[in-house]
């Protein structure tokens, strides 16, 4: 049974870069690949949308159903070309190929050549901390030593290799332990981005005070050290300790910059760290620094280590979310609209490649931008895209605030009769939530009052907003509640209703000094 669907093939072709496509066509021209399959490749390459009839056309020369050839021919040929294309630039490919060479030379009794290649590749495997390859090479070295002994050639002893093997296994286990810890922290963070309660803080502190993260004494490799700093930076982000968070990020970047092979091995963590520094500058209201950090990420797009579709997407999302956020907060409408245009173009170009999480972040930021600039119908469209997300655990924080923002948008669009039902639904939603911001409940209660006011045609709206402002000031005395402003500046919204001043003007005034540092 063929496991590769027509859609799988279409998506794979669409994921190829220009240089990969060029390499594939050159390879095809030098091989005896069925020309009908290259015709199919060219058809998919220029197509904008998937169509089933791409795969059911008959050849003029023979009754060939191309659909039956997908899995065994074109799909596998593309994968083969990708292996060849990236073979010379990836440490993993190189070491793996050289291990095959060692085995072939061993079979040919070319033991001296085996030793030369083995020593070199073992050194490379250690440099890149490819522990599984080191163990494989140690296994080959054991075989080689048994032959070299017969020729009175002395290298490592079996005892030394066993000891080395044990050390490598310990390092691999240690790295696996830190990788698992990172997965747990990352999952917890995706569900609850910022700490909302003392219970959230207890969870964060339990991680930070654990033996693995309290200090770096347990670390046995540079890769584990990178993950250690990454975990700590995530946790400091959650509890809003930006000073400690920035220190962890700077240390992580220094380690990777000092050991360039780590950038090649872990390019995604490098980009994530730069993006964390963007967010820190944003949260600390240092927009000039924020813009410089965004430029740093943009510059990585042209470097070899980051030249994959996955990483290019990461750069695209980080850069545009960063630009849109600071331009929106600064009241720069023209620049914000240009950012949105670029985002929407990218969402179409990278269709099905951008993760749901990144889509939600884009939608939320665009909704916020339109809200601040008074484009409530457009904002509601994007909020609707978030609320229609089926996975309630995906960026739970954004989905929660999207519900709150939806209330405000209905209010601004004078949909007062619908507000009662929406508020009732959100109340039921909060009954299922373990933790939430007190500000969220406050917003909910005041919009319930405001909607009732509008339905009864009463006119003391300003008095309610003044009361809202006073109660909000009391709630904001809790340091956890200040995190709300990173999702939506409710204080500016209330002020705009009291002073009858557009939100974007108030935002521009509030964040004017942010561009000084």
Image (cartoon, rainbow, N blue to C red):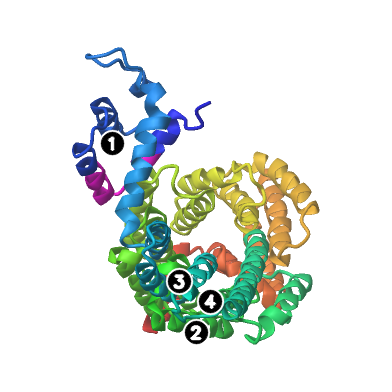
Residue under numbered circle 1: 45
Above or below — where is 9 with respect to 232?
A: above
C-alpha distance separating marks 1 and 4: 39 Å
**How many marks do you count on the picture?**
4
Q: Quadrant of residue 338?
A: bottom left
Which segment did they paint magenta?
12-24
Q: Which mark is residue 417?
A: none
- Nearest the viewer among 237 and 126 is 126
Q: Which mark is residue 251?
A: 2
* Quarter of the C terminus within the rendering: bottom left
User: Would you say the residues marked 1 and 3 are in contact, meaning their CB atoms lie under 8 Å apart?
Assistant: no
Q: Which mark is residue 226?
A: 4
C-alpha distance separating marks 2 and 4: 9 Å
Query: Which residue is at a point 67% across and 72% down the rendered structure image?
Result: 481
Badge 1 density bin: few <14, some 14–19, many ≥20, Cα 10 Å: some
Residue under numbered circle 3: 125
């Amino acid at each position: 049974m063929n496991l590769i669907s027509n859609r799988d093939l279409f998506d794979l072709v669409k994921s190829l870069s220009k240089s990969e496509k060029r390499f594939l066509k050159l390879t095809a021209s030098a091989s005896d690949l069925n020309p009908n399959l290259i015709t199919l490749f060219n058809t998919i390459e220029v197509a904008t949308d998937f169509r089933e009839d791409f795969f059911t056309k008959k050849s003029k020369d023979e009754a060939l159903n191309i659909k039956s050839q997908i899995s065994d021919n074109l799909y596998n040929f593309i994968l083969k070309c990708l292996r060849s294309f990236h073979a010379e630039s990836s440490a993993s490919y190189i070491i793996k190929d050289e291990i095959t060479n060692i085995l072939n030379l061993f079979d040919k009794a070319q033991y001296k050549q085996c030793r030369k290649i083995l020593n070199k590749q073992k050194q490379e495997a250690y440099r890149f901390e490819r522990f599984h390859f080191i163990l494989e090479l140690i296994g080959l070295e054991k075989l080689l030593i048994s032959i070299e002994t017969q020729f009175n050639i002395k290298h490592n002893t079996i005892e030394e290799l066993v000891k080395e093997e044990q050390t490598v296994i310990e390092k691999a286990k240690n790295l696996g332990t830190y990788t698992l810890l990172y997965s747990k922290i990352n999952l917890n963070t995706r569900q609850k981005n910022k700490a909302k309660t003392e219970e959230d803080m207890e969870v964060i502190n339990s991680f930070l005070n654990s033996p693995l993260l309290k200090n770096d004494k347990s670390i046995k490799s540079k890769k584990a050290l990178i993950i250690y700093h990454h975990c700590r930076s995530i946790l400091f982000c959650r509890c809003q300790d930006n000073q400690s968070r920035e220190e962890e990020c700077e240390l992580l970047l220094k380690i990777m910059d000092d050991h360039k092979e780590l950038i090649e091995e872990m390019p995604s963590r490098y980009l994530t760290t730069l993006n964390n520094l963007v967010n820190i500058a944003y949260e600390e209201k240092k927009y000039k620094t924020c813009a410089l950090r965004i430029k740093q990420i943009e510059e990585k797009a042209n470097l070899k280590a980051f030249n994959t579709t996955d990483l290019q997407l990461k750069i695209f999302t980080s850069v545009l979310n960063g630009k849109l956020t600071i331009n929106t907060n600064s009241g720069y409408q023209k620049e914000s609209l240009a950012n949105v245009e670029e985002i929407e173009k990218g969402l179409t170009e990278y269709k099905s490649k951008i993760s749901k999480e990144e889509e939600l972040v884009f939608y939320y930021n665009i909704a916020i931008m339109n809200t601040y600039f008074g484009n409530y119908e457009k904002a509601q469209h994007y909020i609707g895209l978030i609320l229609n997300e089926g996975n309630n655990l995906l960026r739970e924080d954004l989905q929660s605030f999207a519900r709150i923002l939806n209330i405000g948008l209905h209010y601004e669009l004078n949909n007062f009769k619908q507000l009662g039902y929406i508020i009732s639904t959100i109340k039921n939603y909060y009954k299922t939530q373990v933790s939430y911001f007190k500000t969220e409940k406050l917003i909910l209660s005041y919009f319930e009052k405001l909607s009732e006011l509008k339905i009864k045609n009463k006119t003391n709206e300003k008095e309610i907003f003044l009361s809202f402002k006073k109660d909000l000031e009391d709630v904001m005395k809790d340091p956890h509640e200040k995190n709300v402003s990173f999702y939506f500046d409710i204080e500016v919204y209330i002020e705009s209703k009291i002073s009858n001043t557009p939100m974007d003007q108030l935002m521009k005034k509030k964040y004017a000094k942010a561009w000084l540092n």
